[in-house]
Amino acid sequence: MGNGKGEARRRGAGRPRAGQEPLTRERILDAALRIVDGEGMGALSMRRLAADLGVNPMSIYHHLPGKDAVVSGLVGVVFSGMRMLPSEGLPWQERVRAYAHAHRGIVRSHPNLALQIVSNAAAVSEAVLSGAEPLYGALEETGLPPKTIVRAADSLVDFVQGFSLGEASNPSGGFDIGSELLARIETQPADNVPALRRVFEALGEEGARYDFDAGFEVGLDILVRGIEVIAAEGARRERPG
Amino acid sequence: MGNGKGEARRRGAGRPRAGQEPLTRERILDAALRIVDGEGMGALSMRRLAADLGVNPMSIYHHLPGKDAVVSGLVGVVFSGMRMLPSEGLPWQERVRAYAHAHRGIVRSHPNLALQIVSNAAAVSEAVLSGAEPLYGALEETGLPPKTIVRAADSLVDFVQGFSLGEASNPSGGFDIGSELLARIETQPADNVPALRRVFEALGEEGARYDFDAGFEVGLDILVRGIEVIAAEGARRERPG
DNA sequence: GGAATTATACATACGATGTACAATTAATCA
DNA sequence: TGATTAATTGTACATCGTATGTATAATTCC
């Protein structure tokens, strides 16, 4: 029955009326993610977050212990949205690639959170954990010893995160560490950087725009091939012939 | 001759007496680096920095336009200290490895700055630029086309930065993304993560401690081998036999 | 039903931060 | 010398995270 309350959640302290939907960790993180996605990390403050929720800033602290918790909560939310194309049955190389694409996709869909994702991912667990499962499953089939599997997995994750971070912090479809240099190379004293000059001049102007998709594919190729090689070496050492 | 001034730089506004050493961008960045290295990024504030320099907070703004400039200045300073073991004459594989070690060494010697290094490196230039020269010089010898050289270089840098970031944000000699999971795997619902469980149980307890040096070497090996493979493929495609 | 307890939200306030603005002083140059 | 410029300081403001205390509605227990 229509309670003539007027604006929802405006005046009056205390516990909310049963009719109104209560403040939730989930609602808070949703609002926070909208702010960060839309206006960047710098726009996220407790006061702004509270304002968007139509709530007093201190109310948030009842559901999350502080701003740090909000931010790492965001990372968790984002990571738990990781979806892989089902790739069971495919050779391990394809499954590793699928994982890498999924991981990159997460960072790419929230570029303003990239820094936090990359630097907090290790501490967030749960979502990250179950996210890594298919990667380990794939790498098991290389026949590498467990210790090397872990290191290979880490290497791949490190690459993906490094790449995604660079991708996120550049103007969309813009440059990368390598290509960013191009503009400055021209203004360098003579032959301070001869190899760089040679490479980028050979690229010409059309090559200057960095294609992130292609760059990612090359990096991924390098890693997968490299893993193939050390796996083959390991196998040869066990059964020398 | 002894000017009876007592404490150096204490009282009195205005331009400093000619005798005293003036405030400099360099002195500011030195002091800032000491704070960050010693007490972490959170301890760096303009007021604290000024206090350490025996100076009014606003004085800093005459030499650097703001706090952001201080931080990215720090990254520049740190990067310009990059030193490679001379590796000219060695095969390109060794030279790529030497670059990677030098790059990692920089981040590792200032772990509290790791996040800023990794996320600002692309925008700092100059030091980063001339630092990357030997990497490009080495990769030129692979015979890969320029575009692929850039992508391979980026991939290697991305890996190194991703690795270094993980290394820096973990307790010294502690765990990594992969190994961090170990502790939580045990507390997971049954077989939610079977491959992870298998791999880490096979590792046993002794393998749980992550050896960053060995991990880095494996990753580097994967990348170098991978580059070898795609270089060989490219050569075969040009001169098919 | 009424009283005690607990969950949730609000109000106020404190210390810290980055920095805009303007005044102050000393070196430098005409 | 007087004018100009470079370097420093002092004050003040808006904003931030959050500690602390209070108010009120829902829930629980008798």
Image: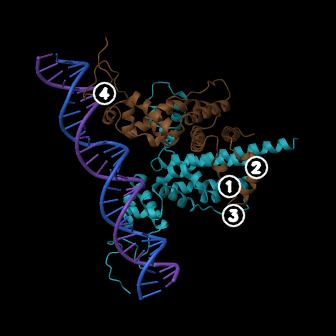
Chain colours: A cyan, B brown, C blue, D purple
Q: Secondary structure at mark 1?
A: helix
Is there a contact, CB below 8 Å, between mark 3 and mark 1?
A: no
- Which mark is on residue B10? 4
Question: Mark 3: which amino acid?
Answer: Asn
Label 2, residues with CA under 10 Å away: few <14, some 14-19, many ≥20: some
Picture quadrant where residue B74 is located: top left
User: What residue is pinned by disc 2?
Assistant: B203
Residue at the disc numbered 3: B192
Choose mark 3 or mark 4, whichever is in front: 4
The reply to the same-chain question for discs 1 and 4 is no
Give the answer, above or below, for where B12 lies relative to A62: above
Relative side of B120 to B10, left or right: right
Up the image or down, B141 lies above or below A150; here it is above
Q: Secondary structure at mark 4?
A: loop
User: Which residue is farthest top?
Assistant: B1
Left or right, residue B68 beside residue A209? left
Asked whether disc 4 touches disc 2, contact meaning CB atoms under 8 Å apart, the reply is: no
Q: Residues within 10 Å of mark 4 (few under 14, many from 20)?
A: few
Q: Where in the figure is residue B112, as x and y percent of width and height?
A: 51, 39
Asked if marks 1 and 4 touch (Cβ < 8 Å), the reply is no
* Chain for disc number 2: B
Q: Which marked residue is nearer to the observer: mark 3 or mark 1?
A: 3
Residue B31 placement (x, y as % from top left): 43, 31
Which chain contains the residue that carries disc 3?
B
Q: Which mark is residue B226?
A: none
Both labels 1 and 2 in a single chain: no
Q: Residue at x 50, y 58 (%)?
A: A74
